[in-house]
Amino acid sequence: MKKKLLIIGTIMAIAPILFSFCGFYVSKADGTLKNKTSQVILVRDGNKTVITMYNDFKGDSKDFAMVVPVPVVLRKDDIKVVEQSIFQRLNDYSAPRLVEYWDENPCNGYGKDEMKAPMADKSMNEVVVTSAYGVKRSTVKVEARYLVGEYDILILSAKESSGLKTWLIENGYKIPEGAEEVLEPYIKSNLKFFVVKVNEKEKLKLNNNFLRPIQISFNSPKFMLPIRLGMANADGDQDLIVYAFTRNGRIESTNYRNVEIASNKNIPLFVQKNFRAFYGNLFTNQWNREDKSVAFLEYAWDVSPQNYYHCDPCIATAPSEQDLVQSGVWWLAGKDWSDYSDVDNDEPDNGSKNVHFTRLHFRYNRKSFAQDLMFQVTPNKETFQARYVITHPATGDFNCAAGKKYLQDLKARRKKELMELTALTGTNINNWQDEALAKNDEETNVAAQYATLIPQLKEDSDSNRENSKENMPVGIVLFAAVMLGGAGLMRWKGLI
Amino acid sequence: MFSTALFKDARYFQIIFQSIFLSYGIYFLHWKNESWLYFTYFFTSLATQFTAEFFLGKRNIPFSNRLKNGIPSILISSFGLSLLLKTNLWWVAVLAASVSILSKYILRINGKHVFNPSALGIVVAVLFTGNAWISPGQWGSGAVLMFGVFTFGFIVTTRVQKLDVSLAFLGTFASLIFLRQIIYLGWPMDYFVQSVSTGSLLLFSFFMITDPKTIPDHRLARILWCIAIAAVSFYLTAFKFMNGAPILVLVFAQPLVPLLDKFFKARKFEWTKSKPYTQEENNFMQVIYSKSYM
């Protein structure tokens, strides 16, 4: 059957986005501080790392404060503010995607063309944070003090955690329960603390009503994100999206399992109406199935300026060279960038202008993520995308022989799609009945409608169950084959 | 059902356990299916072994016997590569597998090969091609796997009397990590547990460093040797943030083995001359065997 790829819809799988991954928010008022999804851009080559932290703090900027552990005392040149829109562009570009195909009517070979705009939808949470700088304590040393963009930045080093804690409290930061447990190891690991608040005067000059992302760069063999501090004030699970750029290939976690999210699946047409809910369910289901302590790969692609295909299919404009430089990909920048990188420049520069992009999605909590996230750059250049396929049925008259066959095939295919849907999302098929019934699924033939097929599916639910665990029998067969092979080998060697 | 003879050569155990680990990774941990890679490792190893035996093998043993005797080693080193070394390029896989097998024929001192075949293949591929990598996180830190590796590893190592190697390495490495993470830095216990329960570390301790052909023959020498490897690996892991440090250190430590053998005289290890089982060991083995697979 001929199919045509016509349009591509996209989603914002990211629900409320809040920057919180490595710092903790502090509050004078005992409000509930809950962080849900944060975003961070990592650029890594050699020992140099550039980290850009998304900031979508929506409260009164006087109340904004953030603490981030960093491996070295940063110089003023190592700290920048960048445009907020870069995160939106990276997210749009790499988000899980829905691909639509149209069947052609086998009786007239006529397809239907249509273009749709990507749907984007995002809601925001708010967090109230209060802080003020004050007198410093002797056990805490202010290593540096900078004004960068609209931010007042202090770099602190501390000798012991109680001193740091006292300092923060006396300066108006209320330490969340449990933060102490990680402050001590961080201090002993010789980490510095990057403390940020908003400079009101500078902010007024900018006339922005949002806070721009902060970008820091440093040289350190450590390639990691300190998430443990961020867990101190988050109850439950937090999502983190990492956009990473390297010269060589994908990044991967070295202390958590790396799993590619289920992709290239055919799913029912009605999922289009609520793709976001579908992907949310799918992610949660996969996350549970993989026992939670995992890094999910959602996208990987060569985005080098010289590479022509930055996506296939593209759901949004691929990041431009300027976007990459803005994200911190210093090896694409010209001479202007050189004073931004370290003076004692030990980063390898083999002249390569390659850029590989990786999007990782974490959902962490204190129990499943005992350690900070450690990463490595691998030479793995393989592309990957989270891609889901819906297929519009053909329309018109199916009175020819091929048309009848088509309807039969359509029924079988749609049953498969429904089973795939339940297997992917871990939801009962009944949960989708409303969607199936409510939406016109473009199929005039009653026998092939999803709503008609769902009850039939329940009848042969036995086979469904097997289908959802299709790996099991394969595993058992393989295991048996290996055992038999082993026994055969031993017999051949005359051992049994 | 199973006679003692079945356990005469510990390599068969090793092959069975390695294949179980690989199946576990693919079917339960949902590794990306890379059968082409596993087959490349296997067939390259086989072809290399065949060629090497033809030109470099011992003339006094019939060719077919030599080939037959070499099969377990081929399986072990190709499984070793499959479990640890990742690459997207076929020629890197071919290089790693052929280096592994050839090293057994070419790099020999006093009738023992110098390098652990798969460890050398991995290090050569990672360091010299830039197109291969190790995924230390691929096993996660599931307790079930930890238990499995310990049990299976125990059998293999007990059988060839080299449990001392695993324990010396793992004990030293884990103690140093414990001292650093819990005592010095003050992380909570689960931080430490995650560090030492990774499958990669346990696999290394029980299936790689234990290769009896590439460790010192004298017991004291090999325990000291393992402690040194553990200490250097710890340093590289904790202070230089190096991934897969133990394998690298092992390869660089292996040329020391002939020297240690010279100063610490002992009987050379032979695969088939290991001690027969005692009655208790035999019973234990039957219990494990029937519980695990039947």
Image (tube, grey):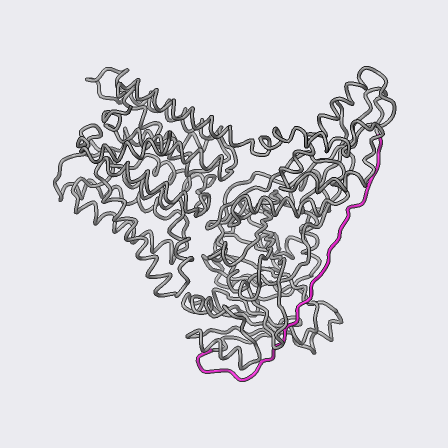
In the displayed orientation, state which residue is furthest to the front.
A459
- Observer-nearest of B133 and B84: B84
Left or right placement of residue B218 versus residue A74 in this view: left
Q: Main secondary structure of the magenta part?
A: loop
Q: Is residue A306 above or below residue A331?
A: above
Left or right placement of residue A12 versus residue A426 in this view: right
The boundaries of the magenta stretch are: A112-140
- Observer-nearest of A1 and A461: A461
At 39% across and 47% down in the image, what residue appears?
A: B244
Q: Is residue A430 visible?
A: yes
Residue B214 inside the magenta-drawn segment: no
Image coordinates for residue A138, horizontal then vertical, percent: 45, 82
Locate residue A267: give its quadrant. Answer: top right
Image coordinates for residue A295, horizontal then vertical, percent: 54, 48
Left or right placement of residue A92 versus residue B251 in this view: right
Q: Is residue A308 visible?
A: no
Residue A116 inside the magenta-drawn segment: yes
Q: Which quarter of the rendering shows the C terminus of chain A?
A: top left
Image coordinates for residue B203, horizontal then vertical, percent: 36, 41
Image coordinates for residue A32, horizontal then vertical, percent: 63, 69
Q: Which quarter of the rendering shows the N terminus of chain A?
A: top right
Q: Is residue A366 above or below residue A448?
A: below
Q: Is residue A160 above or below residue A417?
A: below
